[in-house]
């Protein structure tokens, strides 16, 4: 492959990566804990967009349980988000790991 052709290919991949990053910002995934009692939604930028807590898990005498449920739901949502990003980026890079992406 000639240098010129390789540069064009790299520019194409850069454009596709930029487009995919914009699209991922709009996509969301949700994580939950406590059988769905706590639900957290994050976007492709790993920003928390929404938190839903069922009233029955709000117990002023057991705040630590609610904290654990929220933490578990956030971690699950972030894990799913990372899987989504890796999957979509892998489609463009062919599985090649690019630092910072």
Image (spheres, rainbow, N blue to C red):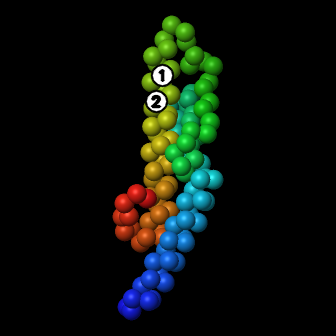
29 vs 20, nearest the viewer: 20
Read off the residue under disc 2.
71
Q: Is residue 78 left or right of residue 30?
A: left
* Residue occupying the point 49% across, 84% down: 8
- Which percent across, then down, holds residue 78? 47, 43
| Image vertical order of residue 94 relative to residue 49, above or below | below
Look at the image and tell me whether residue 30 can be seen: no
Cβ atoms at labels 2 and 1 below 8 Å apart? yes
97 vs 54, nearest the viewer: 97
Read off the residue under disc 1.
67
Pick the quarter of the image with the C terminus: bottom left
Element carrying mark 1:
helix
- Which percent across, then down, holds residue 41? 58, 40
Look at the image and tell me whether residue 67 can be seen: yes
Q: Is residue 6 left or right of residue 17?
A: left
66 vs 36, nearest the viewer: 66
Pick the quarter of the image with the N terminus: bottom left
């Amino acid at each position: 492959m000639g240098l010129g052709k390789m540069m064009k290919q790299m520019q194409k991949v850069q454009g596709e990566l930029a487009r995919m990053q914009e699209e991922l910002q709009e996509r969301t995934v949700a994580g939950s804990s406590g059988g769905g009692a706590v639900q957290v939604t994050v976007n492709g930028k790993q920003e928390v967009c929404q938190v839903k807590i069922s009233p029955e898990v709000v117990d002023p005498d057991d705040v630590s349980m609610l904290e654990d449920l929220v933490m578990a739901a956030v971690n699950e949502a972030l894990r799913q988000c990372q899987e989504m990003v890796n999957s979509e980026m892998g489609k463009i890079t062919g599985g090649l790991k690019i630092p910072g992406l």
